[in-house]
Amino acid sequence: MAPRQGRYQPAREFHVVVLGAGGVGKSCLTAQFVHNEWIESYDPTIEDSYRAQVAVDGRQVVLEILDTAGTEQFVAMRDLYMKTGQGFLLVFSITSASSLTELAGLRDEIIRIKDDENVPIVICGNKADLEDQRCVPRTKGFSISQRWGAPYYEASARTKTNVDEVFIDLCRQMLRKDDAGEGYLEEDKEYDPYSISYYKKKRKQRRSDRDRDPHRPKCVIL
Amino acid sequence: MTPPTTPNGSQEDLIALSNVQRPVFHNFLRAFYPFHPNYAMGDSTVTLPLSEGDVVLVHSIHTNGWADGTLLVSGARGWLPTNYCEAYDPDEMRNLLKALLNFWDLLRSTSTNDRDIFGNQEFMKGIIAGVRFLLERTHCLTRESPTIQRNESLRRGRKSLLSELSALVKTAKRLQETLRGFPRREEDVNDTIDEMILKAFKIIVKGVRFLDLLEEDRRQRAPPAVTVMATVVEESYIPPTPPAESNGVEQGQGDREDAGIRGAEEVRRAESVASHHISADGVQTSTAANKRLSSIYSRTNTTGHPTSQLSPSHGNRLSASISHRVSLAGPSPLSHPQNLVSERLNSSHDTFLSYLGSFIGRLHLQSQSRADLALAIKQSATSGGELFAVVDTVCRHNSLGSESLDQARAAMYDRIRDLVYSARDILSNVGPDADDVIMPQDNSCLLMAATGCVKAAGECVAKTKWVIERIGDFEFESENGNLGIDLALFEKVSESRPTTPEQKIVTDPKPAGPSPTPVSKSMHLSMDKPLPEVPGDDEFPEQQDSEQHSPPASRPQSLVIDDATSSMASSVSSIRPILPPLPKLTTSLLLDDSYSPTTEDSHDSEYQNSYRADTMTASSTGTNSTYLSRDSESSLVSQTSTRATTPDHALGPKYQPSLSELSATGSSAGTEEVDDVESKLLEKTFAHELMFNKEGQVTGGSLPALVERLTTHESTPDAVFVSAFYLTFRLFCTPTKLAETLIDRFDYVGEAPHVANPVRLRVYNVMKGWLESHWRESTDHEAIPIIQHFAEVKLSSLLPSAGKRLLELAHRVSSSDGSLVPRLVSSMGKTNTSISQYVPADTPLPNPIMSKSQHHLLSNWKAGGSMPSVLDFEPLEVARQLTLKQMIIFCSILPEELLGSQWMKKGGADSPNVKAMSGLSTDLSNLVADTILQYPEVKKRAAVIKQWIKVAYQCLELNNYDGLMAIICSLNSSIISRLRKTWDIVSPRRKEMLKSLQAIVEPSQNNKVLRARLQGHVPPCLPFLGMFLTDLTFVDIGNPATKQLPGASSEDHGLTVVNFDKHSRTAKIIGELQRFQIRYRLTEVPELQEWMQAQIVRLKESDQGNVQVSYYRKSLLLEPREQALRTAVEPTTVNNHNNQKADLFGWMSRDRGHGNTVVPL
C-alpha cells in the first residue's frame, strides 16, 4: 500500500488495478477513462498515460491506473500488479460467460494477496451496447454483486456509458476505506481485528452506510 | 405602470448556446475593417496594422480577443484585434490554407533535419495540390476553361497565382541546391527558407484575390431580378483583398456590360453560373456560424442598405468563441456576464424603470418639492441615458433590423427629452422665491411624459433584445453610463438645449493597441486591454479615403446622439494623420469611381519598372528581420503562442511592401516557369488527401495518397514511412486493394509524361519489395493474380525486364511458403544495425563458469542420478544460460505477431513466439517459487532466495530485464514474501539488493524506471516483452482506425482517411522491440540448458491446476499464519481466525460459504 496521506491532503492518490480476461475490452475502458478527447492521437508510452484526476464528492483524487492489457499470459506477474493496487476494477464482457467465471478466480487472488476481504472492488460488465449478444443475464451480475458485496455496473466503452461512473465508485470506496482506516485508531475502541463478530458488525455497518448514501448505486443497469 | 412585455428567455438561451458551442480556433482571419493602431510606430510595438481584406495566419488568440498573427501580405507579425476580423475558410481555399499551415509548421520546425525535409520536393506537394484544388473547384484548372476565357481579370489573377507558385517552386529547387552545395552556409539556407515562407504567403494572397475576383464575377453575372438568388450571392460575397491588380473589379463590370451585347447565350451561361453558385453556397452556409461569418458585408451592393450584411458584433462573437489551440488557463476577461450587452440592457432598463416608477408614484401623491422633482428628473434622465447608451451600442453593432430599432430608439429619446423639457419648463416657470411645491396641473403633464418614457423604453428594450438575439450577444466595456449631471448643470443646459443622455459607451474610441512594450510584457498587459471598438457603420465608408472628419449624418430627432457619434468618429479619424503612409487601400468603392483604362496601363508599366527594386524589398524583408529567423524558435517568449516566435519589433509598416510591389513580383515570373507549374498542376495527385504532423510525418491519408507517397518520384521515399507501410498495410487495406492501387498509380502517372517513368519504376520497386521481403503468403496470395496480370501486360510492355523479374518473384512466392529473403533482414528496427556494431564478432566468448563438480553433477543427473538444485550452480552462469534461452525466443518474434493484438486472439495461435516468450517468463517465475517452497527447512529456503536474488542481479548485469522481471515478480509475490521466518534469515545486504532490483521493475508511473533504462539502451539487451505488448494494445485500442480529413475534398464533409499515425506508432514500437533482437555473445552450456528445460518440464507435469493456488497452499503449510502478535498498526490486514489449522484455507472458502455457486455461471 502506498503511504497513507494526511486527511487534509488536497489530492489523494490511489492505485487502481484493472483486471479481467483478455478480449473483454477492459483496456478500452481504461483508455476511454484516461484518454483526453482533445488529444488527437494517444501515446501510451509516456509517463502519465494512465493517470487521471477526478473529483469525487468534492474531493480531488488522482488515480493511477494499472492496466496490464496484453500481458494476460504473464500469469505470474499478476501478483505483483495486484500488490500495488488499492482498488480493483473487475471487468468481464456481458457477451462472454466464461469471462465472468474468470473473475471469481481473480477476486480470490486479490483477497488473498491483499489479505483483506473488504478491498474496494467494482464489478463491471462491459460491452453493454451489444445487448443482442448478451450471454450473461443481468440477474447473474446482481447475484454476484450481492455475494461479493461489490457494486455491479454495466458499461460500454464504445458508447462511453458508465465509464467514469465505475472509476468514481471505486474512488468513493477507496476514500471511505481510507477515512475509516484513520478512524479505527482514534474512535473505534472496541476494535479487535481478530474477532469475527467485529468484522461482521463492521460489514453490516458498511452495508447500512451504503444504503444510506443516495449517491451510491449498488447496481447500475443501462 | 407595468412596462410592456419583453421577449423573455432569449438571452438566456443565447448564453447557454454560446457556452455549449465548442470554441473554434480559426487558423486564418480576414480583416473586414482597417485597423491602425495609434502608436504603431513605436519601435517596440507589436501591434499589426490591418487593411481591409487582409488575411492573417493566426498563431494564438488571447482570451481578451487580441490575436497573435502574421499578416500574409507582408509577413509581418504582431497583435491584431479579432473583432476587426472574421474567420476565413472558404471551401475552395481550404486545402490551400491547410497546406500553408503544414508548410509553415514544417519550415518553422527546428526539430527536423533540413536535409531530410528539403532534400526533395516532397514538401512542396501540399501547396501545389492546394492551388490545384482551388482552381479545380472554381473550374479554372486549365487556361481554356470558359470562366478564364471569358473574364480577363480572372485570367490575370490565375496567371499571377501560378507565377507565385512557380516562384516558390523555383526557390525550393534553389534550396535543394544550396543544401547539396558544399560548403553550405547555414544563413543561406535560412534565408532561402524565409523567402519561401514569404512566397507561400503570397500564393495565399493571390489565391484569396483570385477567389474574390471570381466571386465578384459571379455576383455581377447573377440575374439581379431573382431576389432570393441575389441575397445568396450577396451573402457569399467576400471583400476583396487589397487588390494586387486594381483593375479586377472594373474588368468585371466591363464584362457585365459586354454581356448585354453578347446576347442570350451569355445570359444563359450567367444563369447557370448563378445556379451553380447557389449550390456552392448551400455548402458554405451549412452551419449557422459559418453562414454568419461568411455573410460579410456588401458595401458595393445595390440595395442602398449600408453594410446590411455586416454585423460588427461578429467580431466580438468570434473572439468570444475562439479559443486558443492550447487552452489557456485562467478566467477570461470576456466571460464576465455583467459585460454582456443583454445583461447591461436588462439592468439599465430596470434602473430606469425604478426611477421613473418612484417618480410617478410621488407625482400621484400630488405634492413634490422642487428639489425632489429636480432630483427625480436627474435620476431618471441619467438612468435613461445609461439605457440609451446600451441601446446605442447595440445599434452600432447591428446592421440587420436597424430601422425599427432606430425608430424605437428615437422614440425613447423623444420621450426622455419630453420629460426633461416638461420638467425644465415647470422648474423655470416657478420663480426662485415662489412656493417650493409643484402645482397639480404640472403634475399631469409630467405624469404623461413619465409614462411615455416607460412605454417607449419598454418598446425600445424589446426591439433591442430582438436585435441582440439575431446578432448574438456580445460584451462591451463601458464606463458607468451615469452622466453625473447635477441639477445645476441640468438647469443650465436646459436653457439652450435638452440634456440628453450622452454617448458614454465608447469611452475610448481610439483603438487601444496592446501596450507597446516587448512581448513578454505586453502579453501580460494585454490581458486587461479591451479590444478596440469596431468602427461604426455610419461613418465607416466615409473614412475610407479621407482624413477628414466624417460629416455627422443629419437625423433631426437624434441630433445630439449623432454629434456624439461623429465626435467619436472624428476621434478615430484624427488618429490617422499620425500614421505612416500605408499601402494604398483600394476598396471596391474606390474602384467603382476611379476606373479608367489608362490607369491600368500605367500601373502595368509601373510594375515592370519597379520589379527589380521590389524583389529586393521582398527578400530583404526576409533576410533582415529576425521574425522569420528560424533560430528565434528557441527564444520563444510568448506563452500563449503555439508556433510563436517573438514578433519582430522593428517590423513596422515600413517593411510592408506596397501592394503594387507584391503584384509586380508576381507578374514578373517568366512565362516558361508558369507553364512548368501549370503542367505540374495538371498532374493528377492525391497529395491533398494526406495529413501531416508538425514534423512533416504522414499521420493520415487515403490509400491512393499513401501509395503516391510511397512511389514519389522526386526522392527516395522516407524509410520509416515505407517500413511502417509494409508492416501495417494489411490492417487498413487488403493485399488485393494495395495491388490495385499501385497499378492505378502506374496508370494515372502516364498523364504526366515527364515523371511517368521514374514513378513507374517506383511502383515496380514497391511491388518487388513487397514480394521479396514483406510477403505473407497466407494473406497476400489473393493478390498474386493481379500482380501477375499486371507484370505480364502493363509492366512488360513498358519495362520488359522489370515485368519479367516481377513475374519471377510472383511465381516464387506462391510456390515457396514465406518470404524470399530471411525475415530478419527486412525487420525495420535493425536497418544498419548488426551485432558487430555493439559486440565485435571477434571478441572471445566468455568462458562458462562451470566447475568440474558442477559438470559432474549434471552428468550424474543425466545418467539417472538426482537432479541438481539451483544452489549448485553459479548465479552468473544460471543467468547467462537463462538469458540465452530467452533471447532465442525473443529473436524469433516476427513483427506481424505483434499487430492488431493478435497474440491475445485465438489463444495466441498466430503469435507463437510471443506466446512462448510469456510462457517462459511464467515458467521461470514458477520455478523460482517452486525451488524455494520445496524445502521444509527455513535455512534452505533462505539460501534459495539468496541464490535467486543473485541470479536476478546477474540478469540485470546482462541487461536481461525479462528475466529480472520474472524472478522479482516471484520473489515479491505474496506466496514468497509472506514467508517471514525465511526472510528473517536473509541477510540485510541481499534484501537491499532485492529492493533496488524491485525498484527497476516497479510498474508504477507506466514503468517509468524501466522505460528510462531502455531509452537509448545499446544491445545486447533483453527488454521486458510485456511492456511492449501493453503499449501495442493501447495504441491499437486508443487510436481510431480512421480520421476525418479537415479539407473539403468531398463536398462539405471531410474525407475519411486511414489514421496512419496509429500505424506509425505501432511500427515504431515494433521497431523498438526489433532493435533488441540481437543475440548475446555467450557460450551455451548444453547440459545446463537441459537441466533448466527439465526443471520447467517437471513443474508443468507436477501441477495441472492453478499453480498460484497450490503454491500458496504450500506456503501456508510451511509458515502458517501468525496470530496475535500483529499490532493494531495494520488494521486493514485482516486475520480473522484463531485456529490456524482449521482456517488454513479460510481465504478461499469464505465467500463460498454462501453456497457453492461461484463457479457455475
Image: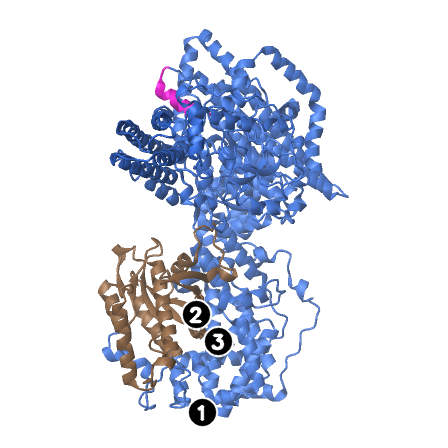
Chain colours: A brown, B blue
Q: Which mark is residue B1142?
A: none
Give above or below for A40 relative to B515.
below
Dot 1 lies on which element? loop
- Residue B839 image position (x, y, % from top left): 67, 67
Q: CA distance from mark 3 to mark 2?
A: 35 Å
Quadrant assignment for the C terminus of chain B: bottom left
Chain ID for label 3? B
- Residue B1073 image position (x, y, % from top left): 55, 61
What residue would you read off at disc 1? Answer: B936
| Residue situated in front as seen by the camera: B20 or B728 | B20
Q: Are discs 1 and 2 both within one chain? A: no
Confirm whether residue B43 shows in the render: yes
**What residue is at 57 percent from the left and 49 percent from the top?**
B639
Cβ–Cβ under 8 Å for marks 1 and 2: no
What residue would you read off at disc 2? Answer: A8
Q: Would you call the spot at circle 1 few (<14 residues within 10 Å), some (14-19), or many (20 or more)?
A: some
Q: In the picture, residue B21 is in which quadrant?
A: top left
Chain ID for label 1? B
**In the rendered view, does B465 fall on the left or right side of B1129?**
left
Residue type, label 3: Cys
- Residue B905 image position (x, y, % from top left): 39, 61
Numbered disc in front, either 1 or 2: 2
What residue would you read off at disc 3? Answer: B969
Cβ–Cβ under 8 Å for marks 3 and 1: no
| Residue situated in front as seen by the camera: B837 or A112 | A112
